[in-house]
Amino acid sequence: MTQALAKGVTGDRLTVGVAARLSRYLQVLTQAKKMGRERISSQEISAYTNINATQIRRDLSASSRCSARSARSCGRRGSTTSR
């Protein structure tokens, strides 16, 4: 298994497992927001999802790395300014 696969990222894409877990995190975050919470820890998300808090942090980190890569590549393709 490559290091990228171990982290749940293949190229610029997340694995199906990471995407499924992100959906569960979103459900917890949405409910917390409805209850007036502005912040929630990975430990609290873990208690609701039964997913290890370390795995939650890794998944969120992997998804933000993919977003950052997408934004950079989109910015280059659509940019009309010269540098």
Image (tube, rainbow, N blue to C red):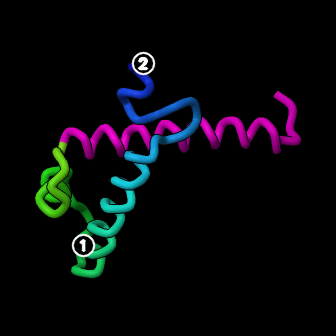
Secondary element at image label 1: helix
Give the main secondary structure of the magenta stretch. Answer: helix
Label located before the other in sequence (2 or 1): 2
- In the image, what residue occupies the spot 28% across and 81% down? 34
Crowd tier of the residue under label 2, counting other residues whose Cα lies within 10 Å: few below 14, some 14–19, many 20 or above = few
Q: Is residue 49 left or right of residue 58?
A: left
- At label 2, the amino acid type is Thr
Q: Residue 6: where, in percent of width, then height?
A: 36, 27
Pick the residue in front: 15 or 43: 15
* Image location of residue 38, percent across then percent down: 27, 67
Q: Relative to 23, is 47 on the left or the right?
A: left
Q: Residue at x 63, y 41 (%)?
A: 70
Instruction: Give 72 or 59, whichever is nearer the viewer.
Output: 59
Q: CA distance from mark 2 to mark 1?
A: 35 Å
In the rendered image, residue 72 lying in the magenta stretch gets the answer yes
Q: Say what secondary structure mark 2 lies in.
A: loop
Q: Quadrant of the C terminus?
A: top right
Q: Amino acid at mark 1?
A: Ala
Q: Looking at the image, which residue is at 73% across and 41% down?
A: 75
* Extreme residue in the front direction: 1
Report if residue 34 lies within the magenta region: no
Neighbour tally class for label 1: few under 14, some 14-19, many 20 plus, Cα within 10 Å:
some
Image quarter of residue 61: top left
Quarter in which the N terminus is drawn = top left
| Residue behind mark 1 | 32
| Point 39% across, 55% down: residue | 20
Q: Which residues are magenta?
A: 54-83
Decide if residue 43 is on the left or right side of residue 81: left
| Of the two numbered discs 2 and 1 in the rendering, the one whose residue sits closer to the viewer | 2
Identify the residue under disc 2. 2
